[in-house]
Structures are given as structure tokens and as C-alpha cells.
Image: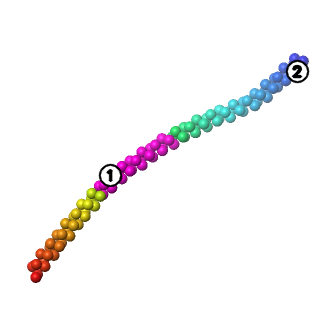
Amino acid sequence: MTPWVDTILLIALVATSACVVPMYLKLKRLDRTQAEYGRILMQSGHALTQAGDAVRGFSTEGREILEALDQRIGEARQLLADLEASRRDLSATRAGRVG
């Protein structure tokens, strides 16, 4: 009876091994996939951090450009006012000569 039991146990061992090996291979593949997903998520985090830094940089640079433009617009308005005053003075001077 011992050979029958040994045979049954050997068949059970082979069947178990046949089931365990594919499971082991699937787990290894899952481990590689999980590591790849982890790497991709880390890279995405770095990319989002860099994008946030870029947006903050654009905001700072935009504010500086806006302040410079505001100053230039003020200078241009003052120049236009000066030119308008000069034109009025010139018109008044010409009107005084003619009249």
C-alpha cells in the first residue's frame, strides 16, 4: 500500500508544482509591473513639481513685465501730455503772431 500512497503523493506534488510555477511567474511579472508603475508615478511627480515651478516663475516674470509696462505707459502718457502742451504753446505763439 505504500507504493500507492507514494504515487498519489508524487502526483499531488507534481500537480501542485504545476499550479505554483505559473502563479510564481505571474507574481514576478506583477512585481516588475508594480515597480514600473512606481517609477512612472515618481517621474510624474517630478514633472508636476517642475511644471509648478515654471508656473510660479512665469507669474513672477509676468508681474515684473507688467510693472515695467506700467512704468513705460506712464512715461508715454507724460510724453504725450508734454507734446500736447508744446503743440498748444506753439499754436498760441503762431496765433499771437498772426493776430
Residue 65 appears left or right of 41: left
Image-quadrant location for residue 40: top right
- Residue visible at 26% across and 60% down in the picture: 74
**Above or below — where is 31 with respect to 6?**
below
Categorize mark 2 by other alpha carbons within 10 Å: few (<14), some (14-19), many (20+).
Answer: few
Q: Which residue lies furthest to the bottom in this view?
A: 99
Residue 50 - label: none
Residue 82 position, x and y percent, is: 19, 66
Q: Which of 41 and 6 is in front in this view?
A: 41
In this image, 7 relative to 41: left or right?
A: right
Between marks 2 and 1 in the image, the one whose residue lies nearer the viewer = 1
Query: Label 1, on which residue?
Result: 64
Q: Which of 71 and 23 is in front in this view?
A: 71
Looking at the image, is 44 positioned above or below residue 63? above
**Picture layout, residue 84 above or below residue 51:** below
Residue linked to disc 2: 4
Q: Give the range drawn in magenta.
A: 44-69
Q: Extreme right residue here?
A: 1
Q: Is residue 71 above or below residue 4?
A: below
Identify the residue at image location x=75%, y=27%. 17
- Locate the C terminus by quadrant: bottom left
Instruction: Sort mark 1 into few (<14), some (14-19) or many (20+) by Cα contacts within 10 Å.
Output: few
Q: Residue at x 61, y 37 (%)?
A: 33
Query: Which residue appears at 42% of the width and 49% of the height?
Result: 55
Identify the element where label 2 is drawn. Answer: helix
